Every structure is written in C-alpha cells, then in structure tokens.
Image (cartoon, rainbow, N blue to C red):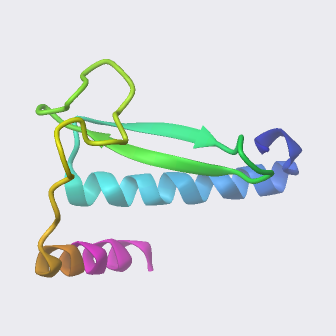
Amino acid sequence: MATELTDEEAAGYWLETLRVARAIIAIYQPLKLNYETLGTTSPHLHTHLLPRYVEDPRPGKPFPFVAADGPEPQIPEHRFVAEVQALRELLT
C-alpha cells in the first residue's frame, strides 16, 4: 500500500510513474492520461496509466478494461515492436 512506503520510496515510486507517463504522452499524444493506483487483491502497489482519446469508449467515466463487443483488436506486431522501442528509448 502506498501509505506503507517510506517518504523516499513513495517519492521514487511517483517519480518513476511520472517518467513513464511522460513517455506514454510523448509517444501516444492522448487528450489526457488517467492514473489508477491499486493494490487490493494482495499486498502490493501498482498504477495503470490509461491514455484517453477523442474516440474514447466511455468519455468522463472509468475506462472499460473488457471489450464490450467481441475480442479486442490486435496491434500488428511491427507496430508493437516499434512502439516498445520508442518507449524504451525515452526511458533509458
């Protein structure tokens, strides 16, 4: 849980989260980025960074994690690899 972190650990966690968020914003250029911090099912802490766009499936509401109409579309492998590489370059 975030409240169990020392001040130094908490500062480090949020600085890393912001660093990743800035990389996501630079690559994907969303309208906004939602931060969802969880850790309820077992003792741990993690944050989902959710880019939101004009074509958002639920504007102004929580992002749906499960596709409503069938399977989620797949990202072509070449695009996935290029995006991973771009994010790695920003984060190294």
> Looking at the rendering, which quadrant does residue 28 occupy?
bottom left
Residue 55 vertical placement versus 13 (above, below): above
x, y (%) of residue 36?
52, 38
Residue ID at (20%, 30%): 57
Q: Is residue 28 left or right of residue 7?
A: left
Residue range of the region highlighted in magenta in the rendering = 83-92
Residue 39 is situated, as x and y percent measured from the top left of the image, at: 69, 45
Q: Residue furthest top?
A: 60
Q: Main secondary structure of the magenta part?
A: helix
Q: Nearer the viewer, residue 52 or 58?
A: 58
Quarter holding the N terminus is top right
Q: Magenta stretch containing residue 8, yes or no? A: no
Residue 60, how many percent across, how many down? 30, 18
* Residue at position x 84%, y 50% in the image: 5
37 left or right, relative to 5: left
Q: Residue at x 20, y 52 (%)?
A: 71
Q: Image height check: is 44 above or below 64? A: below
Pick the residue in front: 36 or 88. 36
Q: Say whether residue 87 is left or right of residue 43.
A: left
Q: Quadrant of residue 26?
A: bottom left
Q: Is residue 87 magenta?
A: yes
Name which quarter of the figure residue 20 lies in: bottom left
